[in-house]
Image: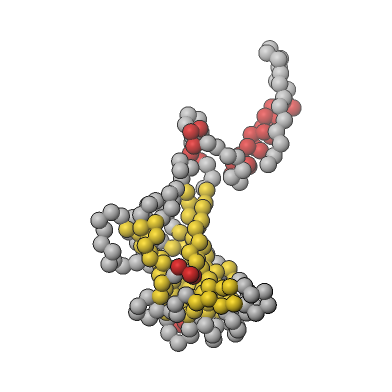
């Protein structure tokens, strides 16, 4: 973070150009640091001349592990499975999606975290494969539910993330899919996330192993 210097003048003194330039420099530094999110501001201070809406966005995240994913009854992927990697005996949980047809899994019935400020979710798939080459296309959608809303409703429009296999059994972090939840999402509401492998849009000729989904979202400074 930028170090600031303090310059003072005595009452009645004439301000010099150098003094005015020093003030401008300090102002420029504050604007730059605020835009970068480097100046912590207590929620209680967001009154008076400080406008919360002008502060930079703050993001938080949650991770949905493959171990907690649920294959759909219709066209579901394989259930969560554990594999021990050969050399260092690392235990890896994955949801395996084959190449024959589109397959689905869901993370049902978790709550949107406190501090979620509404808006889109940025969903990053973590995945790997045991062999092969090519791309995999993940299609992600979801819905939120408020009190007394019916569960059996359509999910939002799916967003996709396409990534290329680099090395077998390496962690692959795909590009973020921008997901708009159906419903009127708000902090504390129940949420369902669905992930599908869209085999018509990828070229990987083997099972794609989904390790989990990282969900990033904007938060409110008041939480």
| Residue located at (26% from left, 58% from top) | 149
In this view, the residue in front, 158 or 129, is 129
In this view, the residue in front, 40 or 189, is 189
- Can residue 124 be seen in the rendering of this structure? yes
The residue most toward the front is 89
x, y (%) of residue 51? 48, 36
- Can residue 117 be seen in the rendering of this structure? no
Location of residue 123 with respect to 17 vertically, above or below: below
Quarter assignment of residue 88: bottom right
| Residue located at (44% from left, 70% from top) | 69
In this view, the residue in front, 196 or 69, is 69
Q: How is the image coloured?
A: secondary structure
Q: How many marks?
A: 0
| Residue located at (68% from left, 77% from top) | 87
Location of residue 32 with respect to 143 vertically, above or below: above
| Residue located at (55% from left, 83% from top) | 204
**Quarter occupied by the N terminus:** top right
x, y (%) of residue 151? 28, 64
In this view, the residue in front, 108 or 90, is 90
x, y (%) of residue 64? 48, 64
Quarter assignment of residue 120: bottom left
Location of residue 166 with respect to 182 vertically, above or below: below
Location of residue 146 with respect to 204 vertically, above or below: above
Task: Answer left or right for 137 relative to 7.
Answer: left
């Amino acid at each position: 973070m930028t170090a600031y210097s303090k310059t003072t003048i005595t009452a009645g003194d004439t301000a010099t150009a150098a003094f005015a330039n020093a003030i401008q420099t300090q102002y420029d530094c504050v604007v730059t640091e605020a835009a970068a999110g480097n100046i912590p501001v207590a929620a209680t201070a967001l009154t008076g001349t400080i406008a919360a809406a002008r502060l930079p966005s703050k993001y938080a995240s949650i991770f949905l592990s493959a171990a907690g994913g649920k294959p759909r009854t219709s066209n579901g992927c394989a259930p969560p499975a554990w594999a021990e990697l050969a050399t260092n005996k690392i235990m890896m949980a994955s949801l395996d999606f084959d190449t024959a047809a589109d397959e689905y899994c869901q993370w049902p019935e978790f709550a949107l975290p406190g501090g979620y400020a509404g808006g889109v979710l940025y969903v990053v798939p973590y995945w790997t494969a045991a062999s092969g080459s090519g791309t995999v296309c993940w299609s992600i959608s979801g819905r939120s539910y408020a009190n007394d809303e019916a569960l059996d409703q359509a999910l939002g429009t799916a967003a996709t993330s396409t990534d290329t296999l680099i090395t077998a059994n390496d962690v692959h972090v795909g590009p973020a899919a921008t997901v708009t939840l159906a419903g009127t999402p708000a902090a504390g509401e129940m949420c369902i996330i669905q992930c599908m492998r869209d085999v018509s849009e990828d070229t990987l000729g083997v099972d794609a192993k989904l390790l989990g989904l990282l969900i990033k979202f904007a938060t409110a400074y008041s939480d």
